[in-house]
Image: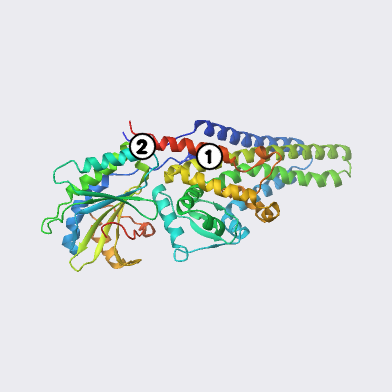
Amino acid sequence: MGFWDVVTGRSKPKQANLDALFAVPSAAITLQAALGLVPTGDGSVCYRSAAGAGFAGTQQDILALLQASDGAPRVATSQDSYGFTWLAVDHDQVDPTAPDLTGLCTDLHAVNTTLELNGYGPGLLCSLIPFTGTDGRKVGLVYLYKQGTFYPFAPSGPNQRDNLLELSVRDAVGGDLPVEKELSRWLALWGAPGL
Amino acid sequence: MARTRFVGDPGLTFRMTTVMALLGGLFVAVVVALMALAWNYSPGVGILIGLVGIGIAWWQWYSSDTIAMKAMRAREVSPEQAPELHAMIDRLCALADMPKPRVGIAETDLPNAFATGRSPQRSVVVVTTGILQRLTAEELEGVLAHELSHVAHRDVLVMTVASTAGIVAGMVARGSQYGVMFGGRGRRDQNSGLIFLAVLVVSLITYAVSFLLLRLLSRYRELAADRAGAQLTMNPRALASALQKITGEINQIPQRDLRAAQSMNAFFIAPAISGVSLRTLTSTHPSLEKRLEQLARIEAELGRPAA
């Protein structure tokens, strides 16, 4: 906030940064090569839904848009206990030999742009792209819209995180993605869809 | 181009800026007037008193977080002690892209919350156990978003700077009281007594005017925080229902139970006293109707169907 915003008590809602999401496919290849983590093909967007007809209509538009194409993913929305809505895009299992996340990223981008075009961009919280390892470990790449950065989240049990795995994921994808440097921003997302 | 559903309020901004300009003008005016009056007599003392006043204001701002925590007997809580509260604030800070403040809980049944601290990096958000018991998660989130907006708007700094004129005037008034009582001896008796009296009158008037302007400014800052908070959670209705719960209950609590909380009123989300006389002029918070009206406007804008 600038000086004038402070003086007049105006904080404008922070707009989401949507562009970095398209770097995920190359990061997925790196993750598979370096750590043996394969994308599940799913992905989800977490946002704050506003009250009223405007938002309900927008969400309907998103669902219709995602399900219009051939080979459309299964789409489901759910509410979490913090009052945020998760829109989960469920693609078929990706081929481990040639993982391609371009389709998923396009879908997620469609969700983001539709929300933003209708004025709900400030409500976007994060996007989550889950990966699984051959040994059953799970880790999600979380994209923070407001910071425009990614961080890994690896739940290893109820309210337990595998911090070592998270740090090695950070080191692996550092060249492909803008990674969140501030560790205090690596929020846990317990019970997120796909993990 | 992305559309925005952010409702600005040019009228509020204009009124707020006007009040702040008046406060700044008042400060300059009182300094010039006191200098002119007291210059011949003892310039050093006048400047010293003014500097002490500014020092007090600076110290109040600099240690506002610890002072307020102590005054409310609040203790800081870690994420392990209050996981839900911390998780809620974590998410709001991620939405608003601001540093996370420290979190405190005050053991009192009074349902209230406040935010203070000298900068967004050194701030603390405190909720009372009363508010935790009474509000639903959604309503509590609305209240927290309101308090985080106070932090983002640096309201403690703004109010401290704005109150400098009043503090200096108050100190000068106190000093010149002694001057009127004891200063009338020596060679320049008559003259100095009159000057002290004039200084006393000027500073008392300044103090009164700056008191009213400060309260006005405080009400505007509350409205601004309401608006920013509702925009952040995208749920003006939750904040509205929280306000109704808090203010409704506070008005029913007898006055004598509330005196202990009086010093903290300016940073509370809802005022803890229900004054009657001159209420509209001197209250630190806008009336519930005004706040609900503004939230209804935001809700209408958020819910408008896409074109």
Query: Residues at badges 2 and 1 in contact (C-beta under 8 Å)?
Result: no
Give the percent coordinates (x, y) of residue B61.
Answer: 59, 51
Snapshot quadrant of residue B187:
top right
Residue B136, image x, y percentages: 48, 53
Dot 2 falls on which chain? A
| Secondary structure category for the residue under label 2 | helix
Kindly identify which numbered label has been placed on residue A54: 2
Residue placed most toward the observer, A33 or A81: A81
Report the disc number at residue B292. 1
Helix, strand or loop under label 1: helix
Do we see residue B43 in this rendering? yes
Report crowding for label 1: few under 14, some 14 to 19, many 20 or more residues within 10 A (C-alpha). Answer: many
Q: Amino acid at mark 2?
A: Gly
> Does the rendering let one see residue B153?
no
Horizontally, is A119 left or right of B110 in the view? left
Q: How many marks?
A: 2
Which residue is drawn at the image coordinates 53% and 58% (left, top)?
Answer: B133
